[in-house]
Amino acid sequence: MGERVQAHGPGDAAPSVSSRLVKRALLGFYRMQGWKAVGTPPPDGRYVIIAAPHTSNWDFVYFLGLVNELGIDAHFMAKDSLFRWPMGGFMRDMGGISIDRSARHNVVDAMIAEFARRDRFALTIAPEGTRSAVGHWRTGFYHIALGAGVPMVVGLMDYGRKLGGLGPAIMPTGDYKADMQQVAEIYQSVTPKHPERGIKDFAGMFNAGKSNA
């Protein structure tokens, strides 16, 4: 996979004072925007959240607000450049897990091991891997859920209706195409911040593209 993951620590220590203040400000902004949070997390507390469509940096702000409103202690994977000063401490305090795509390590196996060692672990992954327009999703989120034996939860962020949160939980069967058809049916009605960057032909998702997360 060619990636190194630093999975230790997110959520294990109390956030710093500065992180709490920044989060409080972001949550205040979120509440003023009129979003509605929906959905219920799986009772087991171990699942992968599919964060799509991801087309804007604003997605992170509303992600924080929605999971806070739903009472979810969510973690998320992001490229290691986002964890450098001055944002590194804040990103880790918010549940971020740094991914180094230049190192020769397997992030999928690392995340499967992380699920095995935790009683509760909600891992959020943006399968597009970028805010730019893409033709297919990376499949790492699927292989993590399949290998860990945990459900995939459809994460919703509909800018058209200002509605977000959690959709249905889908247990991966090993049949990627069949499982993704269920996911695609839900996302076809979701409006991203920048619709022109979102996937328009969901049939392209059914091809097993890049397997990294």
Image (tube, rainbow, N blue to C red):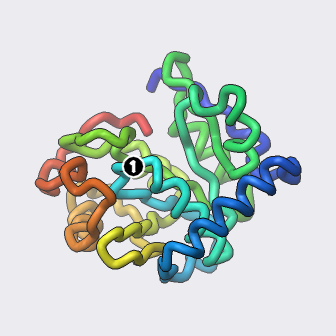
Instruction: Work out whether 203 lies above or below 187.
Output: above
In this rendering, position of residue 84 left or right of residue 63: right
- Disc 1 marks which amino acid? Ser
In the picture, which quadrant includes the N terminus? top left
Task: In this rendered view, identify the residue nearer to me: 10 or 16.
Answer: 16
Task: In this rendered view, identify the residue nearer to me: 168 or 84.
Answer: 84
Residue pictured at 73% horizontal, 53% vertical: 22
Q: What kind of element bears circle 1?
A: loop
In this rendering, position of residue 177 left or right of residue 66: left
In this rendering, position of residue 79 left or right of residue 130: right
Quadrant hosting residue 135: top left
**Location of mark 1 (residue):** 56
Residue 164, x across and y down, in percent: 44, 73
Quadrant hosting residue 87: top right
In this rendering, position of residue 132 left or right of residue 41: left
Instruction: Work out whether 167 lies above or below 144.
Output: below
In the picture, which quadrant includes the C terminus? top left
Instruction: Work out whether 94 lies above or below 39.
Output: above
Task: In this rendered view, identify the residue nearer to me: 41 or 176.
Answer: 41
Residue pictured at 43% horizontal, 57% vertical: 51
Q: Is residue 13 visible?
A: no
Task: In this rendered view, identify the residue nearer to me: 139 or 74.
Answer: 74
Q: How many numbered circles are shown? A: 1
Residue 147, x across and y down, in percent: 49, 50
- Binning the other alpha carbons within 10 Å of mark 1 as few (below 14), some (14 to 19) or many (20 upward) gives some
Residue pictured at 70% horizontal, 51% vertical: 94
